[in-house]
Image (cartoon, rainbow, N blue to C red):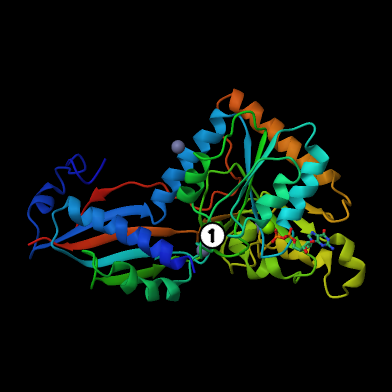
């Protein structure tokens, strides 16, 4: 269950931003997460209230945007969507593919209550 | 640019930045959630590079044979290369004792209930464990095919073991982990004749379906069978790493799990 560690890192990161802006509280936190990030969304959402308890982040809204899993094939040039365990090109079958989206584990933005 | 000194405020967003609307300020961040771990991992990599060694992160499910592979490797290379091991697999001293019995220094990280090593845990160990004179540093990670893949430790290479007593569909079930591999080792090959449900060709197909082109090496650590390809790979990586270091290009795992560039700025 490393989602708790990931969540604690997130809360520390957001709290630092809130302090830097002299915020009273955090209103919302927006993430973008891909299917190859290695993080389970439901576990992350579940860990959030525990990880944020007692911090400026407590009580804030967690919004998670799912990044699509997209491949680019170096052999035939096709850009296509894929499943996490089938990352070969669905057109030509090549394994010379590059994941162009789907590994994201990104803190996109935060909304702070500053007055 | 940063969020503290105001250098990220441009003429376009200045007004907003200084006049929060309804007491609310929106801050665009675009930073990886594990940015702190990654910073620490970079620092760890400097430790390794300063000592001109190659650091190998060894991962697998519990009991796949990580410690056995390290023992067999020490037996084969111990008289030619100086090897060190940092053990994170079990809280007991068992694995470290097995390694020390081979005459190689080993440090046991007390992981408690942790299901993975992170860069900070490894860093604490690096300040306790002498790296001087080492050629190869193995880091035996916690037996787990999920979380260790998310935490960069500063290693140069990831080696992932799949034992033939597990399913040949493991790469399909744990794509994030297997995609992080620089080499995959199919272990306990001595048991293959006794297992009719593990098909090495199917294991390879499942790995290749992840778009992975890394070497897949079949061996038995217990019986010291077919270690040649593994040892050649290991020495090849060390030689290549030392060549690279000379030309000042830092070696990193081939698959960079999180290559998102971080930057911070303010906007509505
Ligand atoms: N038959 C066989 N057993 C092995 C081999 N490698 C490891 N084992 C056994 O598998 C068990 C777990 O091995 P260990 O190295 O402790 O696994 P770890 O938890 O991944 O470090 C032990 O009982 C080993 O003796 C192998 O190549 N062949
Ligand atoms: Mg072990
Ligand atoms: Zn193609
Ligand atoms: Zn974990
Ligand atoms: Zn240090």
Q: Residue extending furthest top?
A: B246
Q: Is residue A93 visible?
A: no
Q: Is mark 1 within 8 Å of ligand 4?
A: yes
For disc 1, the chain is B
Indicate left or right for A69 with B202 as reference.
left
Mark 1, residue position:
B116
Q: Is residue A6 visible?
A: yes
Q: Is residue B22 above or below residue B5?
A: below
Viewer-side residue, B201 vs A49: A49
Where is the N terminus of chain B found, in terms of image quarters?
Answer: top left
Viewer-side residue, B129 vs A46: B129
Viewer-side residue, B16 vs B224: B224
Where is the C terminus of chain B found, in terms of image quarters?
Answer: bottom left
Q: Residue at the spot x=41%, y=71% of the render?
A: A44
Q: Residue at the spot x=48%, y=44% of the render?
A: B123
Instruction: State the image coordinates of residue B196 (x, y, percent, origin top left).
Output: 88, 75
Instruction: State the image coordinates of residue B5 (x, y, percent, origin top left).
Output: 18, 40
Q: Residue at the spot x=31%, y=71% of the render?
A: A62
Instruction: State the image coordinates of residue B225 (x, y, percent, origin top left).
Output: 89, 52
Instruction: State the image coordinates of residue B238 (x, y, percent, origin top left).
Output: 69, 34
Instruction: Give the number of marks.
Output: 1
Viewer-side residue, B108 vs B40: B108
Q: Is residue B166 above or below residue B83?
A: below
Quadrant of the rendered structure where residue A23 is? Answer: bottom left
Indicate left or right for A35 with B30 as reference.
right
Instruction: Say which element carries label 1.
Output: loop
Indicate left or right for A67 with B183 as reference.
left
Q: Residue extending furthest right?
A: B193
Q: Is residue B80 above or below residue A68?
A: above
For the residue carrying disc 1, how many other residues have a C-alpha within 10 Å: few (<14), some (14-19), or many (20+)? many
Q: Is residue B123 above or below residue A114?
A: above
């Amino acid at each position: 269950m490393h989602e708790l560690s990931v969540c604690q890192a997130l809360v520390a990161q957001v709290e630092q931003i809130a302090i830097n802006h002299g915020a009273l509280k955090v209103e919302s936190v927006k993430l973008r997460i891909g299917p190859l990030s290695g993080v389970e969304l439901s576990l992350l959402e579940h860990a959030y209230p525990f990880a944020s308890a007692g911090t400026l982040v407590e009580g804030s809204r967690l919004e998670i945007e799912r990044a699509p899993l997209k491949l680019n094939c170096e052999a035939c040039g096709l850009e296509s969507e894929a499943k996490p365990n089938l990352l070969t090109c669905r057109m030509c079958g090549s394994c010379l593919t590059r994941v162009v989206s789907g590994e994201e584990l990104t803190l996109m933005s935060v909304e702070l209550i500053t007055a | 640019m940063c969020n503290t000194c105001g250098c990220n405020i441009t003429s376009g967003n200045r007004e907003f930045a200084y006049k929060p609307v309804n007491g609310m300020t929106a801050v665009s961040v675009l930073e990886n959630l594990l940015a702190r771990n990654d910073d620490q991992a970079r620092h760890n990599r400097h430790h390794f590079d300063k000592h001109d060694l190659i650091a190998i992160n060894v991962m697998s499910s519990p009991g796949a044979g990580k410690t056995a592979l390290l023992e067999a490797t020490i037996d084969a290379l111990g008289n030619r290369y100086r090897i060190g091991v940092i053990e994170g697999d079990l809280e007991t001293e068992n694995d470290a004792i097995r390694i020390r019995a081979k005459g190689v220094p080993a440090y046991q990280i007390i992981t408690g209930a942790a299901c993975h090593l992170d860069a900070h845990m490894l860093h604490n160990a690096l300040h306790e464990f002498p790296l001087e004179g080492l050629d190869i540093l193995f880091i035996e990670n916690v037996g787990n095919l999920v979380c260790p893949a998310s935490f960069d430790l500063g290693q140069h290479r990831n080696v992932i073991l799949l034992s033939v007593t597990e399913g040949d569909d493991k790469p399909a079930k744990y794509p994030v982990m297997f995609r992080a591999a620089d080499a995959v080792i199919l272990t306990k090959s001595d048991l293959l004749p006794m297992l009719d449900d593990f098909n090495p060709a199917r294991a390879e197909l499942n790995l290749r379906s992840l778009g992975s082109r890394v070497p897949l090496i079949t061996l038995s650590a217990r019986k010291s069978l077919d270690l040649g390809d593994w040892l050649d790979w290991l020495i090849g990586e060390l030689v290549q790493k030392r060549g690279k270091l000379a030309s000042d290009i830092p070696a990193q795992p081939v698959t960079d799990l999180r290559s998102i560039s971080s930057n911070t700025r303010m906007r509505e």
